[in-house]
Amino acid sequence: MPIWYFRMPTMVFGEDSLFHLKSLDERRFVIVTDRVIVSTPLLTLLKENLPEGSDYFLFSRIGVEPDFTEMSSEMESIREFNPDCFIALGGGSVIDTAKVLLFSYARPDKSLYELTPLDYLGIKEKAKLVAIPTTSGTGSECTWAAVVSEREGKVRRKLELASTEILPDYAILDPAMVISLPQSQTVSTGVDAISHAIEAYASAWKNPFSDAMAEKALSLISSNLLDVLSNPLNVEKRNLVHMGASMAGIAFSNSQIGLAHALGHALGADFHISHGNAVGLYLPKVVAFNNRNCTARYRHLNNIFQKSDRKRSLALTLESYFSEIGQPLFINETRVPVEEYTNKLESLMDLTMESTGMLTNPREASSRDVRRLLRSVVRRKQSAH
Amino acid sequence: MPLFPSEEWVKEFIEKVNENADYEDSARTWEGDITFVVQKDKEFDGNAYIHLDLFHGKCRGGEFQMNGEPPQSAFQYIGPYENWIRLINQEIDPIQGVLIGKFKLKGSMMKIMRYTRAAKELVNTANRVKTTFG
């Protein structure tokens, strides 16, 4: 095994963990959030926990997908404010936006394309980053990656940016931030977290540290998510799923994602579908495709699911579990127009092939394999017989 | 068995690249030349340059050069001789190699990150050349 690293933020978790903000040495905060959260009590709660004598600048111009042009619009005002800490309050899009804003603030001389893990950028010399997730799934609070959209001609591409320097300093997992998460988001982000754990555990860059996080993450999520869906106000179960989701984030941040994410990113770039739903759509098919290269590992993961949820293979367990929680298994069950999807198979294949998830998938996939997987989620019409 | 690095090795490597359907598939939209820079270390005296003209999944040509100025190219993949041995023997992944500082990459990082599988296939190809190390 060659030299490798295991990176994660300082984790602050449990009830009232937002209180940790009061102990920060920083005083000039950029609070990054979205247009929905800005009108909820979550923002008020955060502001009440800022240290004495601090000042903040509110950045809330984030739509469903973080778009680089949109997020650059207030950069000048942020520079004038001269912050020493960025606080992200929101889901994956918000946290990813905060990472990119921090980079742009620290390195105005660099273009977005220069946010890569291959250079030292000195980002943290300028400001810290605190991530407070309001969903349980994206894991972005624990990763050194950020996904933002960019349009190149007619093609909308999701840029998978990464640098260890955008890893948050603190990830605060306060269950109060997720207790009122809507059912559909609980499902899509829960599926996303399950996908992180499974892809991290099978990744070509897996390691014993990421394995430990992936196993525990899958255990916490798979055994508590159904209870959360039937009783959304159960704080204890919410808390366990919330921690599991972050563990899955830590796992994949240290061993990388795989083909289901590569396919999901391509689909999400071209169509309006939540990230978790997009990745979850392909995950059972990708697991079936990969199975011959990681049979023992998938068997082990399958055994982590509770006996009542377990089928004879991980792919079948996932199909059954996803059906039960309301995760679509076919394009026909989503809002993506099937005909448009099938017309765009070639461009979806090209985008998938460009994803870094292709590199670490346990089984190498050719463009033909990718095309077949893209087709596999289109339900064939039933014959008249 | 050709010695790495040498003109004979480059010739055989190019032949293998052009036979590799997986490389052709993963690099079918790639345009740009790359230079492999083999740096001097205790086992290898001097700097060697392997310049490859890669276009749409094929290698259109290549040159081997010992010492002097490196050839002009869009990308350079740079590392000491000892690390090249480990890379060719597939003990180091080409992208992980850069992340852990065993290799350096010059050129558009963003472009390379979109062709990580092609980079891996180039290394797989190098592994298929029956190589002698000095």
Image (tube, coloured by chain):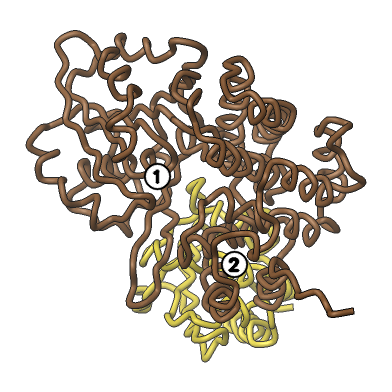
Chain colours: A brown, B yellow
Q: Residue drawn at (39%, 29%), measured in percent from left and top?
A: A131
Measuring from the top left, give residue A184's x and y in whole percent.
55, 41
Disc 1 element: helix
Q: Is residue A268 left or right of residue A241?
A: left
Q: Residue drawn at (64%, 44%), measured in percent from left and top?
A: A2
Measuring from the top left, give residue A159's x and y in whole percent.
41, 59
Q: CA distance from mark 1 to mark 2?
A: 27 Å
- Under mark 1, the amino acid is Ser
Q: Nearer the viewer, mark 1 or mark 2?
A: 1
Relative to residue A353, is residue A303 depicted above or below? above
Quadrant position of residue A348: bottom right
Q: Which residue is mark 1?
A: A93
Q: Is residue A108 left or right of residue B69?
A: left
Relative to residue A243, is residue B22 depicted above or below? below
Q: Is residue A372 left or right of residue A346?
A: right
Q: Which residue is mark 2?
A: B117
Measuring from the top left, give residue B111's x and y in whole percent.
42, 68
| Residue A137 in sight here | yes
Q: Categorize mark 1 by other alpha carbons within 10 Å: few (<14), some (14-19), many (20+).
A: many
Measuring from the top left, give residue A369's x and y in whole percent.
71, 73
- Under mark 2, the amino acid is Arg
Q: Chain of mark 2?
A: B
Judging depth in this view, the residue of A196 and A229 nearest the camera is: A229
Judging depth in this view, the residue of A357 and A226 nearest the camera is: A226
Q: Residue furthest bottom?
A: B60
Q: Residue furthest front?
A: A384
Quadrant position of residue A27: top left
Q: Residue drawn at (40%, 74%), measured in percent from left and top?
A: A155
Judging depth in this view, the residue of A300 and A42 nearest the camera is: A42
